[in-house]
Amino acid sequence: MSLQTGLYVLPSPQEIIEYDGIYTLSFKGSIVINKNCEVAVNHYGKILKEDIYFYTGFSLPILRGNPIENGIYISKDSSLNEQEYILLIEPNMITIKGGDEAAILYGVQTLRQIISQKGAVLPCLSIHDFPGIKTRGFYHDVTRGRIPTLSFLKSLADKLSYYKINQLQLYIEHSYLFKDLSEVWRDDTPLTAEEIMELDEYCARLNIDLVPSLSSFGHLHKLLTTKTYAHLCELPDSDKEPFGFRDRMQHHTIDTTKEESYQLITEMISEFMPLFTSKYFNICADETFDLGKGRSKEAADKVGVDRLYMDFLKKLCGFVVSKGKIPMFWGDIISRFPQAIKELPKETICLNWGYAWDQREDETKALAAAGATQYLCPGVGGWNQLINLIENSYKNIRLMCKYAYQYDAIGVLNTDWGDFGHINHPEFSTSGLIFGASLSWKNEDMSYEEFLKRISLLEYKDKSLKFMSIVSDISKQSLFGWEMLVIYRELHHKVDENSKRKISGIFENLDLDSVYETNDYINSLSDQLYNTINSMDTSSRSLVKPYLVSATGIALWNKIGATIDHTVYNRTNKAADKPANLAIELEQWFHQYKEIWRTISKESELFRLQDLINWYADYLRDIN
């Protein structure tokens, strides 16, 4: 919400009233916690204390007791509901009252946002606030490219809490160190039990529910390409196929007709589940593309693919329930026959996803009519992009949150996937994260432009309010994008005539005539990013380089596309450069990219990206 004082708060409070007067945050003040608050609230006091010191230089003591003059008083109020809080800034005191621990934390987070903008002199106001949707989650892929460091995951939890998000899920296929599955993770840098348990504890202190999420049906590439378990893959010879980013996305569904498949998956769930304190467990079960097409075809011919799907899903959900947990699963398959939701345990939650900028409501409406308990799951638009498609994500999240309110969804789970190697820096999903946090908290129609201004100030401390609009413009300039360059490379491994036709067809269908002008525009936008550094808080300036490096990458790949089009396919393009020079430029760019990757991610699948970069550098030298 923007006030006459120029104050921004995200998510926007349900009710806010400004008064005349100011409160001066004195170095002689204190943070006082009422004795009716649980011990956990002490931690919220410490979070507030740290921010006050950061923005004012004052280190206020934290006390227990009754309100005192010029202090910040925190208390629990039984007349308020869960997650409902009141924040009062008066000339002689600040008061935060919450209906429960989470509500108190949300009041603290709102005050932190105010202090970040106003320092020690705060406008007098009253805020009465509560969420429109009870569960507001974020789903982060830690499998298909990047496995983050624990320190990054903790910083992500901090950011989620700052914007009042209360659920986090990490998408895992193979990137956990399962005890007896060394064949699955032996060439990776998986998360360990100790790391997950430490993160679970860290999230709990921020009132964030860390929900386990594990592939159990489709998307089991690493598991089903091992020598030991390839025989459980729906399609034969899965262990003999070379790795491909597309192949990983499109295949590797488990054969449901074998009892061994069920035993393997339930053993994995049983090992993974105890690491979490959450009452939920997400079994995923999405995009089972190959079901009924290979080893289970005979069974599918008898009972139908839908029946095979439902029988296995029902068994897995029943297993989760037998362990005392509430099952979740992705709803892309069952949305085709939504009445089948009645076959699942009544506790089951359907995660209904859709990522289009103009996402339709049909699936949501049908699942609601069938009686499904559902979360609505939009996306932050980062997969296959060097910089997230920010405006598309805004439109998608706005629509999906609208449907969540309209059809009484019990939660919103905003997704951040890593298809094709998770090329985008996770920081770039912050705008989408905030869109989801805000629109699931309050059902309002804030414009895209207004959101960008507020995110620029609140998240990037950019007083010019221009940072996010510049980044948004850069994100739209990719002409030879990551998905196309991956496909072009992978088709070169194929020797059949169909693949050869597809290779040339990629460039026939790309619009590369405007690369020269587009890259010139990217350069001007990059100059604008450099200029914003001066208007940013020093603590945020380190976030600019990843955007600049990615903008350079977008322009470089555009030029590589133009050069291949010109050199290999003989189409005139004024943006074409000498291929050997581009090979050097590409290798130098990727050196900078790797440096940024390693600041927040384990090595994970960086080697796969390196392999792709090396291929293009060699290819460019070959066509020189």
Image: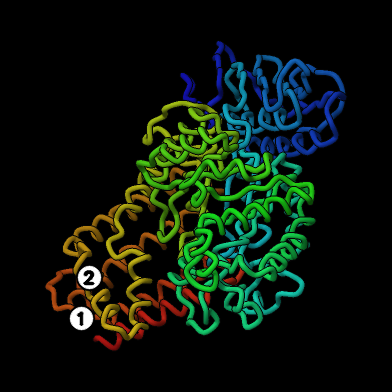
Residue holding disc 1? 568
Residue 183: x %, y % from top left: 67, 79
Asked if residue 485 can be seen in this view, the reply is yes
What is the number of the mark on residue 94? none
Q: How far across and down, in percent of the image, does residue 178 sit? A: 73, 69
* Residue extending furthest toward the top: 20
Q: Position of residue 97 (x, y in %)?
A: 73, 21
Q: CA distance from mark 1 to mark 2?
A: 10 Å
Image height of 587 relative to 5, above or below: below
The amino acid type, in three-letter code, at marker 1 is: Val
Mark 2: give few (<14), some (14-19) or many (20+) Cα within 10 Å. Answer: many
Q: Is residue 52 left or right of residue 479?
A: right
Dot 2: what SS? Answer: helix
- Quadrant containing the C terminus in the rendered view: bottom left
Residue at 51%, 42% (x, y): give it: 338
Judged from the image, the secondary structure of the residue bearing numbered disc 1 is loop
Residue 304 or 470: which is nearer the viewer? 304
Between residue 181 and residue 538, name the one nearer to us.
181
Name the mark on residue 507. Answer: 2
Question: What amino acid type should be assigned to the residue bearing mark 2?
Answer: Phe
Tell me if label 1 and label 2 are in contact, CB under 8 Å: yes
